[in-house]
Amino acid sequence: MRKRIFRSIVALTVLCLLFVSAFLCLIFYNQLSFTVRENLQQRAEIFRESTSQTVFETLAAAEQPDIRISLIARDGEVIYDNRSAAGTMPNHLDRTEVGEAIEHGSGASRRFSETLDEETYYFAVRLEDGNILRLSKTTSSIFGLYIESMPTVIGVIALAIIVGYLFAGNLTKRIVNPINRVDLTAELTSPYDELIPFVKTISQQKEHIDQQMMELKNRTNTIEAIMDSMSEGIIIIDPKGVVISVNKSAASFFEIDTVEGKNILELFRRADLIENARSALNGTRNEMNIEHGDNVYRVYFSSVKNSGAILLFLDITERVNVERLRREFSANVSHELKTPLTSIFGHAEMLNSGMVKEGDEQGFYKQIQDEAARMIALIDDIILISKLDENDASDFELLECVDLKAVAAEAVSALRQKADDKKVSITLSAEPVEMKANHSQIFELFQNLIDNSIKYNKQGGKINIELGFADDGRVNILIADTGIGIPENDKVRVFERFYRVDKSRSKSTGGTGLGLAIVKHIVFTHKGKIHLDSVENEGTTIQIVFDKT
């Protein structure tokens, strides 16, 4: 803008000087022409009443170097000329000024010589004796006048350009600086009245842009907040495969500090994943499973038209584990049910075919009864743990204030005969402890833990049950026995469904392999924590902690 203003001022100055010079030359030329004509007319009029002799004597005595004087007879013959020999000059009767003087007493004309680039002014008067006196004066034409004045004009223009250059630069700064000092970040004010409409338009556009930027920023922040709060990982890549956006969940997937700006080839070394990403960039939607560490992800590759592709990582570890547990559960249930059913079927077949000796029937009936009881206990445990899995509140009592000491005493009483048969002593040390819980589930918890402590105890062993509050006010349950204990390698798996440390021993004791799995479920349902500590051949201690409610 500054250069344009500067060039405009200089160009305007030069054009103005050229125009003024041409205009002044025209004025001077017209003034000169008028002066020459007036001078010739005045001199000629002096001799209007004179004769040719008088004119000749007067003009001969006076020097007229700038004026040409001619005496012309009435027939057009030149009698005298102060510039040329009269005898050599042609007849002048056809000259305009001469004809007008003969007819009207005076005449004037001017003629232009293109060869000499000059203009001659003529004025003629008829004398007393009838002859014609003609005076003429030659001057430069207007073009010649221009040529003559050109050096001066060029000099003046050069001087004006130099002066204009200096003043134009200063003037340009004075014009532009107020505009440059306008603060676009603050409230706009016009440095010139002429710019007020322009400034108003800019202010309106600035407010509109600021509003759009604010909306865009809010929308961006919202999208980023949504993406960062998502547990699913999202990676957006451009058409060249370069990562342009990644949320926190996806960023934690990689072991490098900066993911954005890197090519997808740098992040993954799996050929199938890279191939699916390329297919998505070409418009083909795909999906696949990948394993990363202990987790399993379902990756969806979606194409974004003309913008790249989106990779969505869904953590399906839990679903995969659930599917695996369901398969294992189904297999274990089938196996656990098949064994007693096979035993029942075998004993019944032998009884039905008469292969049992007389007097041995009761033993077979007892075996069938025991296997059926084991099946019923197994089915009851399966139903219970299934309900716990589904968290079916309609099948359980609502939470109520439960006296843990009373529930523990109830479970001990229910298992007293079983403990006495094995000569296992049970000690209950408890202070009044109440918490909001499901009564039937808490009873199931105590019953399973005490039953396990009896089953896997030594003959004449001990069980110690302690109830109370921990130092931080939480409910603390401690059940310790002097049983066979659990090997170190099996501690992490004893809470799994159908897992038995010694399968042959567990079946002989009538265990279903679901007791501790049910206990763990009940503890987690009540938002508690369970901890197992066991030493093989010395005993097992299980500690459960509930938040006080």
Image (tube, grey):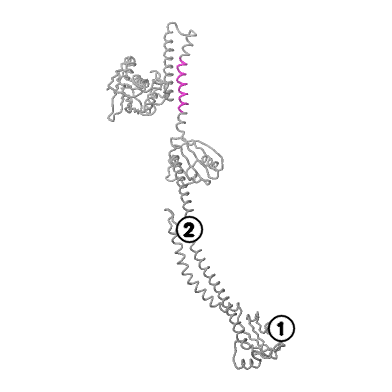
The residue wearing badge 2 is: 195
Given the image, on which type of amino acid does mark 1 rest?
Answer: Asp
Sequence-first disc among 2 and 1: 1
Q: Give, as a single range, the part of the protein colored magenta.
A: 324-343
Res 524 label: none
As drawn, is 94 to the left or to the right of 174? right
Marks 2 and 1 sit apart, C-alpha to C-alpha, by: 69 Å
- Specify the farthest residue to the right: 75
Instruction: Indicate the quadrant containing the C terminus: top left, top right, bottom left or bottom right.
Output: top left
Residue 160 in sight here: yes
Residue 460: within the magenta? no
- Specify the farthest residue to the top: 358
Residue 291 in percent (x, y) is at 47, 36
Camera-side residue of 5 and 44: 44
Magenta region's main secondary structure?
A: helix
Residue at 51%, 74% in the rendered image: 158
Camera-side residue of 79 and 102: 102
Residue at 45%, 24% in the rendered image: 329
**Dot 1, how many residues are within 10 Å of its Cα: few (below 14), some (14-19), or many (20+)?**
few
Q: Secondary structure at mark 2?
A: helix
Residue 141 lies, with reference to residue 82, above or below; the image says: above
- Residue contact between numbered discs 2 and 1, judged by CB atoms under 8 Å: no
Residue 545 in percent (x, y) is at 32, 27
Q: Secondary structure at mark 1?
A: loop
Residue at 30%, 22% in the rendered image: 465
The residue wearing badge 1 is: 94
